[in-house]
Amino acid sequence: MSEPSARVLLIGYGNPGRGDDGLGPALAEAMEKLGLAGVTVDSNYQLVVEDAEAVAHYPVVVFADADAGGPEPFSFRTIKPQAGLGFTSHHLDPRTVLAMAQELFGAEPEGYLLGIRGYQFDPLQESLSPGARSNLEGAVNFFQTWWRQRSCLTSAGGSEFAARSGKEET
Amino acid sequence: MIERTLGIPSDEKETKVASQNPLKRIALEPVTRIEGHAKVTLLVDDEGHVRQARMHVVEFRGFERFVQGRPYWEMPVLVQRLCGICPVSHHLAAAKAVDRIVGGENLSSTAEKMRRLMHYGQTFQSHALHFFHLVSPDLLFGFDADPAIRNVIGVAKKYPDLAVQGVMMRKYGQEIIKATAGKKIHGTGAIPGGINKNLSIEERDVFLRDIDQMLDWAQSALKIAKDYTTEHLKQLASFGSFPSNHLSLVRKDGALDLYHGNLCAVDAEGNKIFDQVDYSSYLDYFAEEVRPWSYMKFPFIKSLGPEKGWYRVGPLARLNTCKFIDTPIAEKERKEFMKLGKGKPVNVTMAYHWARMVELVHAAEKIKELLHDPDLQGENLVVKGKRRSEGIGLVEAPRGTLFHHYRVNDDDQVVMANLIVSTTHNNEPMNRAVQKVAEEYLDGKEITEGLLNHLEVAIRAYDPCLSCATHALGQMPLLVELYDLEGNLLDRKARGE
């Protein structure tokens, strides 16, 4: 089977052992099950430096994370590469991952951040809150629609699909 | 102050004791705690002198109760929830504890070497990540450099080869974890009494192909840390530094051993506090102090008491406690490192980075040594013996000594768990480092960029583990707050806001 012309890497990250912090991995799991053409799914507790090497292989990357205070049910916005100074090795900003991909591997994938609103970030809570679960469902549906439209446009050589509700970060 | 005996899970109410401190208390009720952050609070008097500095790190509280009632064999997988950066440490510490419960602590050589390969792979990737991502910007650009430049992208622009090496070293270590633990996160390789797979010849050959390159790169990173420390020793000698005790596991012959050994502690002069202590008796040697302002406890060596018994763990402590390193390049480097202490332990906080890089080289050497060992292709993977109702497992995690202790009932359910993580051991030292830096760099009653930078640099030396906390969008990893003696907030800054 030939490789789809449109490809995206979806990285869902967060700690599933901290309640709604697991929204990112939950989205990744849902998309993995759906098996959309052209979608490669990865999941981790947090972003790490080698993600820069991974994203460098894709024209488009979507970072999915829980959002503790953002709009409901989710937000979706473009993000640009940006340097950041880490405080610990346990936290890496998605914009820094893009900047590293650019600087280290000469890659400039389009970057998007899907922030799914969560409400309960309790330790040792392995399940999502009802509100987060509902928001996750909306995010899953949105991602499918977005990607299908996006990949159709890409295949047809169309213009870029506008990001929903997203204001572009600078 | 409440002192409690280790091994008895604390009641959260214990932390709500009245403060004995005569100074105005800083507001830190549970509701004000910020998940996902380290928080530094500084208390200044009218003259702008620091009267109190405290660092608060969120701990994965409640885990010890969470695992109660779960079957013991789940522990090596379940505890990996604790940290996404070093899950292998928890995986192996729990596995070692569970080994004792199934009477399988005398592992087959294949099982032990597979676990060691997993552990050194983890140490390699963790140390490389810490150095490249966090430390190299400080060392290459200086503490006072503009944060807009002093970051991992700044390194990538100015030192692209080094930056790529950092990423590839991290990746190499992660691939070793995947090959030994089954996957990069939530691995299942270590099981009660052994391991569930060996290393195939094909897997081995993939790693052998690149190991010499990894060793070369590790030595380059070590050189950066060493050169920086020696060239800036005058500045670094006092930066966030203080005399302290040091604790780690050491092998029976005194060698550095990150996977297994006995406990050794030395004081600031190098005198042995204890040596070759079987870690199964750790309850006889350690206690914890609970302070009203922090959920994170303060462990100390019982015989010295809480005032004098606190200690450091991690790379600096390990080089101070071991007699030698059993790999040639790292041993040569250790000897050079120890000259810093002029015959005594090295107490320079910033020397953590140099020590960490000596261990990076050691990890690469050990990986190479193990890859050439045919025992990794052995078939004897699991041993069992007489069942016990209790198990204690320790490893030297990248950030320091990690304790796991479980008791189980006849139905194989965990009835007691006690975990002491590296960041908890380093709680008092991190607080002391913050106090020293604040005293030196606080100017007036506002938090300057300079103060923030230097606080970050001092804390980074220990690389406290925050992975137990959440990382949701909108949460900043470091907050610094400044209060007057009346408890009024004077200034507040967050890195990344």
Image (cartoon, rainbow, N blue to C red):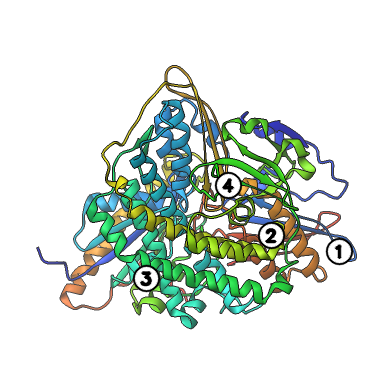
Quadrant assignment, res B99: top left
Asked whether the residues under the numbered discs 3 and 4 touch, taking CB atoms below 8 Å apart as contact, a structural biologist would say no
Name the mark on residue B435. Answer: none
Amino acid carrying label 3: it is Gly
- Measured as percent of width and height from the top left, residue A80 is found at 42, 75
Q: Nearer the viewer, residue B109 or B57?
A: B109
Q: Nearer the viewer, mark 3 or mark 2?
A: 2
* Residue reaching furthest to the bottom: B158
- Measured as percent of width and height from the top left, residue B120 is found at 44, 53
Circle 2 is placed at which residue position?
B346
Quadrant of the frame with the N terminus of chain A: bottom left
Q: Nearer the viewer, mark 1 or mark 4?
A: 4
Circle 4 is placed at which residue position?
B254
Question: Real-space Cα distance between discs 3 and 2?
Answer: 45 Å
Number of numbered discs on residues:
4
* Circle 2: element type: loop
Callouts 3 and 2 on one subunit: no
Question: Real-space Cα distance between discs 3 and 4?
Answer: 51 Å
- Residue at image point 28% right, 55% down: B204
Circle 1 is placed at which residue position?
B49
- Measured as percent of width and height from the top left, residue B347 is found at 71, 59
Quadrant assignment, res B483: bottom right
- Residue at image point 27% right, 46% down: B377
* Circle 1: element type: loop
- Measured as percent of width and height from the top left, residue A154 is found at 21, 74
Q: Nearer the viewer, mark 3 or mark 4?
A: 4
* Circle 3: element type: strand
Callouts 1 and 4 on one subunit: yes
Circle 3 is placed at which residue position?
A111
Q: For the residue carrying disc 3, how many other residues have a C-alpha within 10 Å: few (<14), some (14-19), or many (20+)? A: many
Amino acid carrying label 2: it is Val
Q: Nearer the viewer, mark 3 or mark 1?
A: 1
